[in-house]
Structures are given as C-alpha cells and as structure tokens.
Amino acid sequence: MDDYTDAEIRSMKAAILHAPGAIAKRPLIIGEIPTPQVTPGHVLLRVRACGVCRTDLHIAAGELPARRHPLIPGHQIVGEIVDGATAELPAGTRVGVSWMGGVDGTCPYCRRGMENLCDSPTFTGYTVDGGFAEFALARADFVFPLPGSIDDLHAAPLLCAGIIGFRSLRVAGVEHGDRVGLFGFGASAHLAIAVLRAWGCDVYVSTRGVSHRALAASLGAAWVGPETERPPVDLDRAITFAPSGDVVVAALASLRKGGVVAINAIHLDRIPAFDYDRLLWGERQIRSVTNMTRADARDFLETAREIGLQPKATPFSLDQANEALLAIAHDSIDGAAVIVPGG
Ligand SMILES: [Zn+2]
Ligand SMILES: [Zn+2]
C-alpha cells in the first residue's frame, strides 16, 4: 500500500447504482465513498481496469431483479492486490475477477463439480460490489492470475466476455473443424471467433451493424450477413449473443440435424412459438449458458495466452461510466468497453 496516502485509501471514487433506471437516463452516479475494508478470505484490489458487459446493462436497467442497493456494478476486474495478501497471492500481484465471485462449495451442484449452477452463488457487481470503482474486494479463491503478455485494458474483456464465450463453445459441444454460427458480434463473439479459428472451425457471423460485420470478416469469418440472414450452409453449432428470442429461432433454423444452439444471454425477451417438426425434430438442441466455473476461467486464460488473443477494447474513465453503458446499449463500439479508473 506504500504508493497511496491514508486519505486515498480511506475513500474512493465509484460509479454507484442507487436505483435501476433507463440507460439513457444515466442511472450510475459517480461519487466518493469509503474504501471497503479487507475481510478474512478476501483481498483488496486497486482496480486497474474493469470491463463493461451486457449483464451490467440488465442490472442497471432493472431487467434483472435488484439484489442490493446501492450497488457498484462491474464484474470484469483487473486489479492489483493491495491488502489481504497471502503467500500464494503476494501484494502487487495482478489478478482478474469475474462474474462468479464465490460459491458455497457444499450444495448438490458444487459437489458435482457444477459450481456454475451453485444454489447460493456470489455474483460480482450484483450481489456484492464490483469494479466500477478505484478499489474492490474479492474472494481470494475466486481471483485468477493474468498472463503478463496482455495489458490491463485488453485483459479486462477476457474476464466475462471471454470466459463466458469460451464456455458457450463448450456448451455447444464445438469440435475442431466444425461449422459454427455466431449470432451477434459484440465483446464476447469477437473473442470466441479467435478461439474457433485456432481450432480450425469455419465461422459464420450474422449480426446487425456494418462495422461489426467488417470486424468479423477481418477476424477470419468465412461468411458475414445481417442478423436476419441465414448462413449459406447448415451449421453444426450456433451461439446466440443477443437478448432476443427471435435470434434463437433464426439460429435454430440454421442447424443441421443433431446440431446445438447455445444461448449466451442472461436475459431474453421471450422465445416466439416455432415449428417443432421443422426446427427441433432431428435431435436439435437448445441450451442455455449459465455463469462459469473457475476451470472455465483458467482454461480460457491459458488458451488466450497460447493464441495471443488481443481483444478490441475502448477505454472510458470512471466519470464516463454511463457513456460506457450507452456504448454497449447502442452497439456503437466494436469489441469491448472498459472502464479505466486511473484513466
Ligand atoms: Zn458479464
Ligand atoms: Zn454451491
């Protein structure tokens, strides 16, 4: 903690959600609050960067039920340990924190190795304060050392967009050489495509927005088209990223027999009625992707290091936290939005 004066440690700047509201009405209030005190089993991090995820929009807009207020959102934290250090996690270690902030370790799901489905989970930036702040508290057993080859701005989007995108590929059962459709091309998809290309898959991208299609093409998509257009081949797997049931049906209509759609969305408007005989018969499957395990995080971060994954990221200061939410809401940036408190 030597770099900070006592006054700097005692209080911190944060983007706080007092009550959910429309994103256009700028629901986050930037203010000065006491810095959290380290508690047993936790580490205090100085936040170096925190990615913005679509889930943050759903929380800020009240589309997910409020769990606590006031709340500091943000669950893709790159931070440096400043208090609560241990032998394994010495002071100064750069670590990442993701959406899963902790599990009970005792429920039937945890005991089956399915901690992503834990009955009593802690969610960073939802059930506990997150990283849209200068400091954040995290459970010591839910932080991940980060590859040194990736800087703070570019490491942040790996921590939810990247990990959940990677888990989506697993849930969809992607095998090397598969034909894979990505429906939507935001922060998560633009990382998933790099993994898919490394696995020798042909990737078909349906997305709105000319710049998203251009980015997909530049990252090696075999085909790009508007969100309503069907890829020119039958897909082995499809992953949907938009919070839209229409997109799920479009993805289903693009599958071969036995194919899988994995829905990477924590919130969906609704799934419209669809024709069972034509769209689901033939052992096609629809699966949701729910949270992540620590193994997903470690495996993905190792893959990211191996393939030299470089997310596209746009920095925002803490004062611009509402603008960062708006950028995601309007799909107005390519890749990820990242809040950099020191920026
Ligand atoms: Zn997220
Ligand atoms: Zn559990």
Image (spheres, rainbow, N blue to C red):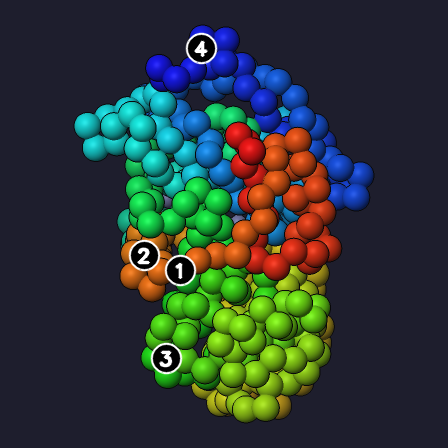
Mark 4 CB near ligand 1 (8 Å cut): no
Q: Which amino acid lies under the numbered mark 3 shown in the image of this protein?
A: Gly
**Which residue has dot 2 on it?**
305
User: Image check: 64 left or right of 104?
Assistant: right
Sequence order check, earlier mark of 1 and 4: 4
The residues bearing labels 1 and 3 have C-alpha atoms spaced at a distance of: 15 Å
Question: In terms of sequence position, does the residue under pointer 3 or pointer 4 come before the other?
Answer: 4
Q: Are marks 1 and 2 in contact (CB under 8 Å)?
A: yes
Q: Label 1 CB, ligand 1: below 8 Å?
A: no
Q: Earlier in the sequence, mark 4 or mark 2?
A: 4
Q: Which mark is residue 231?
A: none
**What is the crowding at mark 1: few (fewer than 14 residues within 10 Å), some, or many (at least 20)?**
many
Horizontal and vertical percent position of residue 264:
54, 62
Which residue shows up at 67% across the image and 36% down it?
320
Measured in 3D between alpha carbons, the distance from the residue under mark 1 to the one under mark 2, in whole angstroms, is: 7 Å
- Is residue 220 among what the camera can see? yes
Residue at 40%, 60% in the rendered image? 309
